[in-house]
Image (tube, coloured by chain):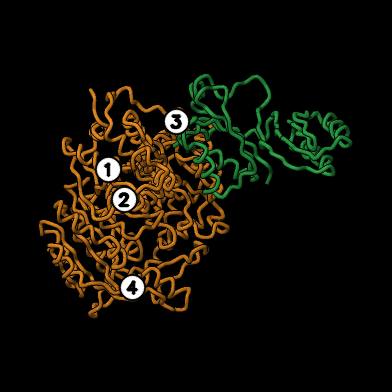
Amino acid sequence: MKLTGAQILWECLVREGVTDVFGYPGGAILPAYDAMLDYPIRHILVRHEQGATHMADGYARASGGVGVAIATSGPGATNMVTGIATAMMDSSPIVCITGQVGSRLIGSDAFQEIDITGITLPITKHNYLVTRAEDVARAVREAFVIAKSGRPGPVLIDITKDAQQASCEFDWEGAAPSVPGWRSRPEAPASAIAQAVALLNEAQRPVILAGHGVMISGAMEQLKALAERGQIPVAMTLLGIGCLPASHALNFGMMGMHGEAWVNHAIQEADLLIAAGMCFDDRVTGNLKTYAPNARKIHIEIDPSEINKNVPVDVALIGDLRDVLTRLLPSVAEGNREPWLRHIDSIKGDAAVRDIQSLPDDGHLYAAHVINDLWRATRSRDTIVVTDVGQHQMWEAQYYHHEAPRSLITSGGLGTMGFAVPAAIGAKRARPEADVWAVVGDGGFQMTMCELATAVQDSIDIKVAIINNGFLGMVRQWQEFFYERRYAATPLSGPDFVKLAEAFGIRGIGVTKRSGVLPAVDEARAHAGPVVVDFRVEQEDTVYPMVPAGGDLHAMIRRPNPIVETAADV
Amino acid sequence: MIMHTFSVYVEDQPGALNRVASLFRRRGFNIVSLAVGHSETPGVSRMTIVVHTDAGGAHRIEAHLYKLIHVIRVEDITQRPAVIRDLALIKVSADPTSRPPIMQLAEVFGARVVDVAPASLVIEMAGSEAKIDGLLDVLRPYGVLEMVRTGRVAMSRGEGTRSGAGPAAAMPETEAGVSYSV
């Protein structure tokens, strides 16, 4: 069967199971767009190529599959860079396809020519420059294998215009991936497993540190089994949230810079850390010199380059987390760690400073109220929350109690503002039956709010909750703590978001009082179609607790005048 | 911190050298020398890379190299018995009177004179870096006009072929704990 390179591209994507692509056309990718019309592909026209990559990322994280973004050469390709880097840092499998100028023009600084494979070299797992139609199929097939195997990540395929136009014999089988250096399933040696088991069984004060790898590997059941069998408390990284239900007795919450105080203290007092699919990011360790000084460390990780990168470990189990835990579990002794769990509970008792109900309803609206009420109103339904980056992101992590894996999607590693709205659109396409809420600050929202038009044009029913405090809040908070309240360039104005929503043809709701939160959430949910809710919250509210960057994990800045939360909040 | 020497087998693909070099830059390792050429297997290039780093850094370099899709195999041969050579071409200023002593020096160092011109000689020497440095020291008084060196190329001693018959085909699946692309 003779096909053009463009047809081969779609033929392969369809065979890889792709149904949705997020993209933006242009000169160098036109042959591919022309061929697309003949294939069962739903194309979502974005407003900026960064949005396409975040949508593909959101799609991948919500579905567990691979997200696909497509753009033209030059600026189309460079606009993708932020989204590709975001996916790289958070191990999210996306495949980005870019058009490239004709192969004979490469290197000539032709119109809209850019060396996108060079630019994305350090932010992709791998990338391809395809200059012949004959090479399209293999590149696509390899890209999917590479993107989703091992530690997932983004792959970019740059296809010259002539490679899209030329015809050749299409041979799916003949294009089977051939990567001599690729071996994706390392297996931890039995001796290391035995060592880990020995450490586990003798530990008095162990803590499991659960990260994104739990979800990627699909090891939720095994993690729960390990925690329950050994009676081991579980702390989560930001991206690990949801891997164990928040209501589980052994789920103690988030660790790190804005983690729960009792979790950070428990880590500092632990005699064993079991790091499962997490990489000891500086945002969770604080000062490495004083980090978990009494703890032995077991690191279960599929990427060998993470071992001993930040924290030296006693036992490294390199392999797929689910496999490793499955092999580990039978030898783990049933634990009775009552004194340790009681001890953490006692720290928690002192440290529960969450003042959700207790904050006065004095006409002010607090972000914590909004998030907590949003959780109450949506907890009984299949809901995905996609956050942006900043204060609202941390409040979401603290006050929205996630029960299900893949129910929180957020940019962790790169901390990409502007992520939420497009990633929510991608998540909704991946899981149309779920309610998808983008929780976003007024700063990040204004970075990619153009994608509301995408949601409208393609009827993608996302709900957007803007936590609007008129500041670049997290930066303002750092200025408050570390720069003597000199608010350089953090006060932020914006349009009237309700009117803006209406201009997009979207329902807009403004909320200024706590009593308005639940009705607004209900109204948004009941409305078929995208909704923007503008929550005008307290301007100078602060995320507590906080470990200053590089500070000791146990030395947190605490909320002044702690008010103990009521039972109804948890 | 010591000099670590890596032998790296990579698919002979456009951009492969760039990927490897970029990795060292990106991760903050400074390459002391890098030599690349064909290996015994068609389609597979072999690089010898020398980096000044500690044991942890060497381990990370190896793990990161394996994450590059084009990288087939990495060996840190720093601690292994190995043959290590550098090749130098040195052009020395030489007139008829200074030519004989220079040629004698070259002979002492096991180097060869590969070109003779009225006012200069080109000396070729393969050997350890220290030995080449030694030759350079004694040649300098005569006037070194030009020099080019390949940087270190290395091969571990003994019978084992390391790259395997076909790329990756002969490699055990679970060796050494770190050898995986992910």
Residue A464 x/y as whole percent: 21, 61
Residue matched to label 4: A471
Chain rendered orange: A
- The location of residue A334, given as percent across then percent down, is 42, 41
Q: Quadrant of residue B159?
A: top right
Residue for badge 2 = A76
Mark 3 or mark 2: whose residue is earlier in sequence: 2
Q: CA distance from mark 1 to mark 2?
A: 10 Å
Q: Which is nearer the N-term, disc 3 or disc 1?
A: 1
Q: Is tag 3's residue or tag 4's residue first in the polypeptide sequence?
A: 3
Q: Position of residue A435 (x, y in %)?
A: 18, 53
Chain holding disc 3: A
Q: Nearer the viewer, residue A373 or B68?
A: B68
Label 1 vs label 4, nearer the camera: 1
Quadrant position of residue A463: bottom left
Disc sitting over residue A135 in the figure: none
What is the residue that sits farthest to the bottom in this orientation? A362
Q: Distance of mark 3 from mark 1, alpha carbons?
A: 33 Å
Q: Amino acid at mark 4?
A: Phe
Secondary structure, mark 1, is helix
SS for dot 3:
loop
Mark 3 on the same chain as mark 2 = yes
- Same chain for the residues at labels 1 and 4, yes or no? yes
Tag 1 and tag 2, C-beta contact below 8 Å = yes
CA gap, disc 4 and disc 2: 31 Å
Q: Which residue is mark 1?
A: A29
| Residue under the point 58% across and 33% down | B36
